[in-house]
Image: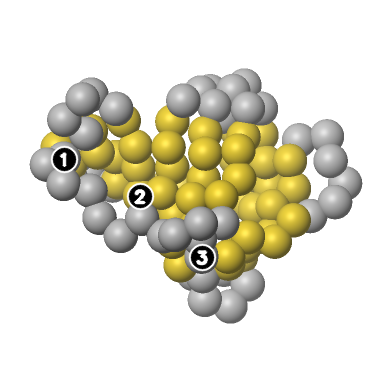
Amino acid sequence: MSVTEKFEGVALLTKANVYFDGKCVSHAFVLPDGTRKSVGVVLPATLSFNTAAAEIMECVGGSCRVRMKGDSAWTTYAAGDSFEVPANSSFDIEVAGEPYHYICHYA
């Protein structure tokens, strides 16, 4: 899978979403067709996220390990990879070394 490098004609919400004392920072934006997405970075840490809507997390830089709710195994993702998270679920993410850069595509 190729890495998404840019989006054209978006409306960017300038106030950042800051989670876990700054370990994860993202910015939401809206495409011309009304689709909402966010881009962000997770610094080295192990964090747990809850989802309301289903999400597809696309890695555009760095790498991470992810464990989905109910799973015991971790899966590694790097640039060009993505993983899906169901609505009303959760996942653990572990970032070691360089930050993990992502695009969150909401379903």
Q: On the picture, is 50 further left or further right than 80?
A: right
Instruction: Residue 42: tell me if it is visible.
Output: no
How many angstroms separate mark 3 from mark 1 (CA)? 23 Å
- Asked where in the image residue 78 lies, by quadrant, the reply is bottom right
Q: Amino acid at mark 1?
A: Val
Q: Residue at x 62, y 34 (%)?
A: 85
For disc 3, the marked residue is 79
For disc 1, the marked residue is 10
Mark 2 or 3, nearer chain start: 2
Observer-nearest of 1 and 44? 1
How many angstroms separate mark 2 from mark 3 (CA)? 14 Å
- Asked where in the image residue 22 lies, by quadrant, the reply is bottom left
Q: Residue 79: image x %, image y %?
A: 51, 65
Q: Amino acid at mark 3?
A: Ala
Q: Residue 96: image x %, image y %?
A: 63, 72
**How many numbered marks appear?**
3
For disc 2, the marked residue is 39
Residue furthest to the front in view is 1
